[in-house]
Amino acid sequence: MKDVWVNDIHLEFLDERAIARFFDELKSRDPDCILVGRDTGQAHTVCDYLIHMFQLIQELSGLPKKDVLAKLQRIGDEAGSYFKLLLPEA
């Protein structure tokens, strides 16, 4: 398995072209997994950055933003249900 780990990347300091180059570089590494650490961006922008990263995933690539959000919500709900079973008091 080939992992790429990025941490403390503060994308809010990059313009759109630099962000695109950053994502192209991630994609060019052909990772099986991209691990994204803290401090990705400011609270009001981080969702857009994460959606952009998720669109690099083949399964989500080419989907409109609303469909990506819906799919990520379903994935989050599934994960939440799983953890609720594991941690019933959480």
Image (cartoon, helix red, strand yellow):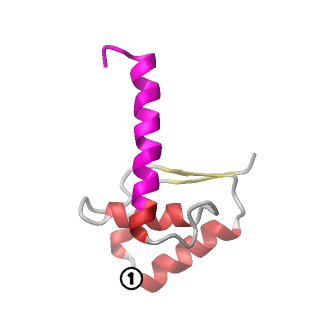
The answer to whether residue 73 is left or right of residue 62 is left
The residue at 45%/72% (across/down) is 64
Q: Is residue 30 magenta?
A: no
Q: Nearer the viewer, residue 33 or 85?
A: 85
Q: Nearer the viewer, residue 50 or 88?
A: 88
Q: Nearer the viewer, residue 43 or 38?
A: 43
The residue at 53%/66% (across/down) is 55
Residue 87 position, x and y percent, is: 39, 17
Q: Nearer the viewer, residue 71 or 87?
A: 71
Q: Identify the amino acid type marked 1.
A: Asp
Q: Residue furthest left?
A: 44
Residue 59 position, x and y percent, is: 61, 60
Relative to 84, is 36 above or below?
below
The residue at 34%/74% (across/down) is 13
Q: Residue furthest top?
A: 89
Q: Label 1, secondary structure: give it.
A: loop
In terms of image quadrants, where is residue 45?
A: bottom left
Dominant secondary-structure state across the stretch colored magenta: helix
Which residue was labeled with disc 1? 15
Relative to 78, is 68 above or below?
below
Q: Residue furthest right?
A: 1
**What stretch of residues is rendered in magenta?**
69-90
Q: Is residue 9 visible?
A: no
Residue 86 position, x and y percent, is: 45, 17
